[in-house]
Image: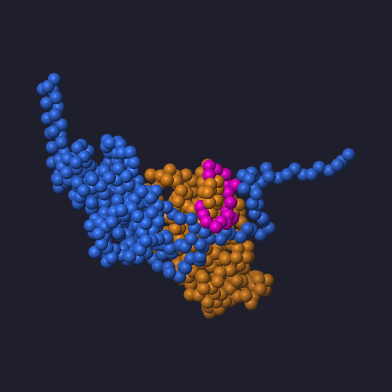
Amino acid sequence: MTEDVSTASTGAAAISRRSLLRKGSVLGAVAAFFGVGSAAAQEAVKDDSALADMWGDFFQQHYKKMSPEEVQAAIARIERKAKREYGVELTVGNEPPLEGVVFGYALNISKCKGVRRCVEACMAENNQSRDSQIQYIRVLEMDYGRMDLTLADGYYSAEAVPRPGKFYLPIQCMQCENPPCVKACPVEATWKEADGIVVIDYNWCIGCRYCMTACPYWARHFNWNRPKVPAEEINTDTHYLSTRPRAKRVMEQSTFCLQRTRKGRQPACLEACPTGARIFGNLLDPNSDIRYVIENKTVFRLKEDLGTEPKFWYYTD
Amino acid sequence: MGRCSTLLLALLLGVGLIGLGLAGPFAESVRAQSAKAGKARPGAKAIKAARPDTKEEDDQDNPDDEEKEEGAAAGAQKAPTDSDSVLGTLMQRREAVQGLTRRGQSIANAPPFTVIEREPQLEFYPCADCHEDQTPNPKVRELKDEHTSLDFQHGGGRFWCYDACHNRKDMNRLVSLHGEPISFNEPYKLCGQCHFQRQKDWFFGGHGKRAGSFLKPREIPAEHSKIDFSKRNKIGTWRSDKRVLFVCTQCHDAHSPSIKPYQPSPPPEVRRGLTRHEEVREKHVTVWQSMEPAPRGKAK
């Protein structure tokens, strides 16, 4: 609950966290005393002021437990908050998983040249904080003939890539079929959707970072600070479970651009890749690109022995 | 013994005739090819083309069939000593069967697709505007007046314009090894004649790039510049029933096809409180190996 309050506190810079906590706790106590729930609380404060939105956020339920109306109300609050904070008209989608679709990703490490255009596109698409180290994709530079991740360099910079004697291994959320992050979460703020994508309810996350330590792929990222994105660079095409602006002290991770893929579009990293190293598609569709790659190429998955069943295949050709 | 050989000959002839009969519309091309090459192998290929079902099964069972056949064909010919004579042989065959074969048009079972057209993107297209009145010059030379920026690295510099790609009879189009004109929008038909395994991967989605909103390959300059994300449109899709592909020449310069080095986007910041140890990686030793033993004090 503390996190909910802090989420709300970003909505109005004028109100400090401490004062809000005090107000929130008093109001909560009053509400509990009179036996009124969140719905009644919303009724009581009908205007769309920052305070009302904070109040709504404070009593917001878990995403999966909210009724469609409550979800719409939550989305409206997010959009109003974005308007107040950034002055942008945000569109927060709520598309459910597509029927008969399980997403999978493949990456050709013969083709990847380490240009990091995927990282750049990912940052722009997913509204990641520009000044922090949160980058969903980490491109590791490695020596030929080695698969030792302890010697991999994610911070390489060069005049031109590929450098001789090196190959490049981008890592990101692998959307495990057996995700350890989901098991580690004490409040069930993260779960696997029907299309195989692991998502986070940012309002429910308490920021304990258990999932961060549970993930063997270094894919979970924590917002130590309030994300800073220039207003003119905000991607306004968002989804409740992926791209919407995050708050301080919540986890985030790649969702294979859920806001795009659930509308049939490709992930941003794939579109930005200049060498065509990335392949994305529906694992249940026998005609999909990803199925062709898995069936016809020499593929491997990272840390397969851990039993996490990642849906991210690497291949060479 | 003589009777046996006569029977065998008759049997072989019968099989051959049946084969030619099945080939149907391709019988003419088969004859032309057989007469020139002096062997029956193209007949089998033509039957396959005429009966797509057979081809589909073959391709599904063993994707390497095509490769083996090509290898066998190369082995059956007199082994040429250098690449020029290979090209010469190919050119002779091309003249013989010009316009008759339908090889290299597609691969069975590949999901349907459309491509982003190249012709509107070409700087000098239509080529015939200039080349209409000129006689094609097959001589290998340095280009001084036009097309001076072309870097002929394809095949190690062995190819010249009209050797295998450009059509000297119709300058606005390319040409297959068998003399069929190929549009600049469909270079995969041309490239796939040699790079057939890549072509197959491309048809099925294992190679190449689907059209998308952010970037077209080859639009990225060698030096890093920020991607312009304002041009977001919605043409790219992962669905297998709506495939829009970039063709070969969208990513590869046909005259120098290897992908050129880029300057990478800047690296992430090193996390606060941490420093990056250059030497740990350069010397290929782990952190604990790189640590020097603590200096020993003079106890005594």
* Residue in view at x 56 percent, y 61 percent: B266
Q: Position of residue A87 (x, y in %)?
A: 52, 77
Say which of A52 and B201 sits in front. B201
In the rendered structure, does residue A152 fall within the stretch colored magenta?
yes
Q: Colour of chain B?
A: blue
The image quadrant of residue B215 is bottom left
Residue A155 appears in the picture as rendered: yes
Q: Position of residue A217 (x, y in %)?
A: 55, 50
Of all residues, the one furthest to the top in this rendering is: B1
A265 left or right of A215?
left
- Per the rendered image, the range of residues in magenta is A144-162
B102 left or right of A100?
left
Q: Kindly report the secondary structure that dominates the magenta region of the rendered protein.
A: loop
Which color scheme is applied? by chain
Residue B40 appears in the picture as rendered: no
* Residue in view at x 54 percent, y 55 percent: A138
Query: In the rendered view of the protein, which quadrant contains the C terminus of chain B?
Result: top right
